[in-house]
Image (cartoon, helix red, strand yellow):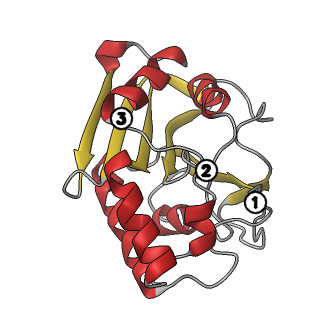
Amino acid sequence: MNRKRSWGEENKSTLDTIIEYLRFNKINKYIPQNCVLLDLGCGYNGTLLKKYRNSIKKGVGIDLSVNDKDTDIKLIEGRIDKKIKLRSNEFDIITSLAVIEHVESPKTMLKEAYRLLKKDGILLITTPSKYNKPILEFLAFRINVISKDEIKDHKRYYDKFSLEKELALAGFSKNKIKVEYFQLGLNIFAIAKK
Protein backbone atom coordinates (compact mmCIF):
# COMPACT_ATOMS: atom_id res chain seq x y z
CA MET A 1 0.00 0.00 0.00
CA ASN A 2 1.43 3.37 -0.98
CA ARG A 3 -0.12 5.94 1.27
CA LYS A 4 -1.16 9.36 0.10
CA ARG A 5 -2.26 10.82 3.43
CA SER A 6 -0.42 11.63 6.62
CA TRP A 7 -1.15 10.44 10.14
CA GLY A 8 -3.91 12.57 11.64
CA GLU A 9 -5.36 13.77 8.36
CA GLU A 10 -8.35 11.58 9.10
CA ASN A 11 -9.87 11.00 12.52
CA LYS A 12 -7.80 9.07 15.07
CA SER A 13 -9.35 6.60 17.47
CA THR A 14 -9.12 7.20 21.20
CA LEU A 15 -6.61 4.35 21.53
CA ASP A 16 -4.50 5.77 18.67
CA THR A 17 -4.41 9.12 20.50
CA ILE A 18 -3.39 7.45 23.78
CA ILE A 19 -0.60 5.50 22.05
CA GLU A 20 0.62 8.71 20.39
CA TYR A 21 0.70 10.44 23.79
CA LEU A 22 2.79 7.58 25.25
CA ARG A 23 5.32 7.93 22.41
CA PHE A 24 5.58 11.67 23.03
CA ASN A 25 6.06 11.01 26.73
CA LYS A 26 8.91 8.58 26.00
CA ILE A 27 11.01 11.29 24.29
CA ASN A 28 10.02 14.28 26.45
CA LYS A 29 13.24 14.41 28.51
CA TYR A 30 15.38 14.48 25.34
CA ILE A 31 13.92 17.72 23.94
CA PRO A 32 15.99 20.59 25.42
CA GLN A 33 14.85 24.19 25.67
CA ASN A 34 15.63 26.38 22.65
CA CYS A 35 16.63 23.51 20.37
CA VAL A 36 16.08 23.38 16.63
CA LEU A 37 13.77 20.39 16.14
CA LEU A 38 12.89 18.42 13.00
CA ASP A 39 10.08 15.86 13.09
CA LEU A 40 10.33 13.35 10.24
CA GLY A 41 6.86 11.99 9.62
CA CYS A 42 5.25 14.79 11.62
CA GLY A 43 1.69 13.89 10.68
CA TYR A 44 -0.85 16.17 9.08
CA ASN A 45 -1.04 18.62 11.98
CA GLY A 46 2.53 18.50 13.32
CA THR A 47 1.20 17.53 16.75
CA LEU A 48 4.60 16.88 18.36
CA LEU A 49 5.98 20.22 17.17
CA LYS A 50 2.90 22.02 18.47
CA LYS A 51 3.44 20.37 21.85
CA TYR A 52 6.93 21.91 22.06
CA ARG A 53 6.28 25.19 20.20
CA ASN A 54 6.78 27.36 23.28
CA SER A 55 10.06 25.76 24.36
CA ILE A 56 11.94 25.21 21.09
CA LYS A 57 13.76 27.83 19.03
CA LYS A 58 12.56 26.45 15.69
CA GLY A 59 10.33 23.56 14.64
CA VAL A 60 10.14 21.92 11.23
CA GLY A 61 8.05 18.91 10.24
CA ILE A 62 7.89 16.88 7.03
CA ASP A 63 5.16 14.50 5.91
CA LEU A 64 3.28 13.45 2.77
CA SER A 65 0.52 15.96 3.42
CA VAL A 66 0.49 18.74 6.00
CA ASN A 67 -1.80 21.40 7.38
CA ASP A 68 0.59 24.30 6.91
CA LYS A 69 -1.60 27.07 8.30
CA ASP A 70 0.45 27.33 11.51
CA THR A 71 2.86 30.24 11.76
CA ASP A 72 5.00 29.11 14.73
CA ILE A 73 6.25 25.94 13.12
CA LYS A 74 7.10 25.08 9.53
CA LEU A 75 5.38 22.03 8.03
CA ILE A 76 6.70 20.82 4.68
CA GLU A 77 4.92 18.47 2.33
CA GLY A 78 7.28 15.78 1.06
CA ARG A 79 8.80 12.35 1.44
CA ILE A 80 11.27 11.61 4.20
CA ASP A 81 12.89 8.65 2.47
CA LYS A 82 14.21 10.73 -0.43
CA LYS A 83 16.71 13.61 -0.49
CA ILE A 84 15.31 16.26 1.88
CA LYS A 85 15.70 19.85 0.73
CA LEU A 86 17.06 21.24 3.99
CA ARG A 87 20.58 22.37 4.89
CA SER A 88 23.03 19.85 6.33
CA ASN A 89 23.96 20.16 10.02
CA GLU A 90 20.88 22.28 10.82
CA PHE A 91 19.08 20.44 13.63
CA ASP A 92 19.83 19.74 17.28
CA ILE A 93 17.16 17.06 17.57
CA ILE A 94 15.38 14.95 14.96
CA THR A 95 12.39 12.86 15.96
CA SER A 96 10.67 10.12 14.01
CA LEU A 97 8.01 8.42 16.08
CA ALA A 98 6.25 5.33 14.73
CA VAL A 99 7.33 6.25 11.19
CA ILE A 100 10.30 4.13 10.06
CA GLU A 101 8.09 1.06 9.72
CA HIS A 102 6.07 2.92 7.05
CA VAL A 103 8.75 4.29 4.72
CA GLU A 104 9.89 2.67 1.50
CA SER A 105 13.59 3.32 2.12
CA PRO A 106 14.54 3.48 5.82
CA LYS A 107 18.23 3.55 4.82
CA THR A 108 17.73 6.82 2.92
CA MET A 109 15.64 8.30 5.73
CA LEU A 110 18.31 7.52 8.33
CA LYS A 111 21.15 8.81 6.14
CA GLU A 112 19.23 12.04 5.62
CA ALA A 113 18.64 12.33 9.38
CA TYR A 114 22.37 11.90 9.95
CA ARG A 115 23.17 14.58 7.35
CA LEU A 116 20.67 17.05 8.80
CA LEU A 117 21.84 16.73 12.40
CA LYS A 118 24.38 19.14 13.84
CA LYS A 119 27.52 17.65 15.40
CA ASP A 120 26.41 16.06 18.69
CA GLY A 121 22.79 16.27 17.50
CA ILE A 122 20.41 13.49 18.50
CA LEU A 123 18.02 11.31 16.51
CA LEU A 124 15.08 9.86 18.49
CA ILE A 125 13.10 6.99 16.98
CA THR A 126 10.23 4.85 18.17
CA THR A 127 8.87 1.90 16.22
CA PRO A 128 6.73 -1.15 17.02
CA SER A 129 8.83 -4.24 17.70
CA LYS A 130 8.33 -7.46 15.80
CA TYR A 131 6.66 -8.81 18.96
CA ASN A 132 3.94 -6.19 18.57
CA LYS A 133 2.88 -7.23 15.06
CA PRO A 134 0.19 -9.78 16.06
CA ILE A 135 -1.18 -7.44 18.75
CA LEU A 136 -1.43 -4.48 16.39
CA GLU A 137 -3.09 -6.65 13.75
CA PHE A 138 -5.58 -7.95 16.32
CA LEU A 139 -6.39 -4.40 17.52
CA ALA A 140 -6.80 -3.14 13.95
CA PHE A 141 -8.39 -6.00 12.05
CA ARG A 142 -10.29 -8.00 14.68
CA ILE A 143 -11.61 -5.46 17.17
CA ASN A 144 -11.17 -2.26 15.12
CA VAL A 145 -9.83 0.04 17.87
CA ILE A 146 -6.80 1.38 15.98
CA SER A 147 -6.35 2.44 12.36
CA LYS A 148 -6.45 -0.46 9.90
CA ASP A 149 -4.82 1.69 7.23
CA GLU A 150 -1.85 2.46 9.48
CA ILE A 151 -1.23 -1.21 10.27
CA LYS A 152 -1.69 -2.27 6.63
CA ASP A 153 0.96 0.30 5.71
CA HIS A 154 3.65 -1.27 7.95
CA LYS A 155 6.41 -2.46 5.67
CA ARG A 156 8.66 -3.98 8.35
CA TYR A 157 9.08 -4.63 12.05
CA TYR A 158 12.37 -4.36 13.88
CA ASP A 159 14.10 -5.91 16.83
CA LYS A 160 16.78 -4.01 18.78
CA PHE A 161 19.63 -5.43 16.75
CA SER A 162 18.19 -4.80 13.29
CA LEU A 163 17.40 -1.16 14.14
CA GLU A 164 20.87 -0.63 15.62
CA LYS A 165 22.40 -2.08 12.46
CA GLU A 166 20.35 0.29 10.23
CA LEU A 167 21.47 3.28 12.32
CA ALA A 168 25.13 2.23 12.08
CA LEU A 169 24.85 1.80 8.30
CA ALA A 170 23.47 5.36 8.09
CA GLY A 171 26.66 6.74 9.67
CA PHE A 172 25.97 6.74 13.41
CA SER A 173 28.84 5.35 15.46
CA LYS A 174 27.86 2.15 17.31
CA ASN A 175 29.11 3.57 20.60
CA LYS A 176 26.70 6.51 20.18
CA ILE A 177 23.62 4.38 19.56
CA LYS A 178 21.33 3.13 22.33
CA VAL A 179 18.38 0.92 21.45
CA GLU A 180 15.96 -0.47 24.01
CA TYR A 181 12.56 -2.06 24.25
CA PHE A 182 9.79 -0.26 26.10
CA GLN A 183 6.13 -0.89 26.83
CA LEU A 184 6.77 -4.53 27.74
CA GLY A 185 8.87 -5.13 24.63
CA LEU A 186 6.12 -4.11 22.23
CA ASN A 187 7.95 -0.99 21.05
CA ILE A 188 11.53 0.04 20.45
CA PHE A 189 13.17 3.33 21.37
CA ALA A 190 16.43 4.37 19.73
CA ILE A 191 18.63 7.32 20.50
CA ALA A 192 21.56 7.97 18.17
CA LYS A 193 24.03 10.82 18.57
CA LYS A 194 25.98 12.24 15.63
Q: CA distance from mark 1 to mark 2?
A: 9 Å
Q: Which residue is mark 2?
A: 102
Q: Is residue 169 visible?
A: yes
- Disc 2 or 3, which lies upstream in sequence? 2
**Residue 194: quarter of image:** top left
Residue 29 location (% of width, % of height): 28, 51
Q: Looking at the rendered structure, which numbered label has been put on residue 138?
A: none
Q: Is residue 123 left or right of residue 182?
A: right
The amino acid on which the numbered mark 2 sits, given as a three-letter code, is His
- Mark 1 is surrounded, within 10 Å at the Cα level, by few (under 14), some (14 to 19) or many (20 or more) other residues, namely few
Residue 69 location (% of width, % of height): 78, 73
Q: Is residue 71 left or right of residue 31?
A: right
Tell me the SS state at disc 3. strand
Q: Residue at x 44, y 43 (%)?
A: 125
- Mark 3 is surrounded, within 10 Å at the Cα level, by few (under 14), some (14 to 19) or many (20 or more) other residues, namely many
- Disc 1 or 3, which lies upstream in sequence? 1
Q: Residue at x 50, y 85 (%)?
A: 13
Q: Residue at x 60, y 47 (%)?
A: 155
Label 1–label 2 contact, CB within 8 A: yes
Tell me the SS state at disc 1. loop
Q: Looking at the rendered structure, which numbered label has been put on residue 191?
A: 3
Q: Which residue occupies the foreground of this view, 97 or 122?
A: 97
Q: Which residue is mark 1?
A: 3
**Screen quadrant of the N terminus:** bottom right
Q: Is residue 194 visible?
A: no
Residue 183 location (% of width, % of height): 23, 58
Q: Residue at x 33, y 45 (%)?
A: 188
Q: CA distance from mark 1 to mark 3?
A: 27 Å
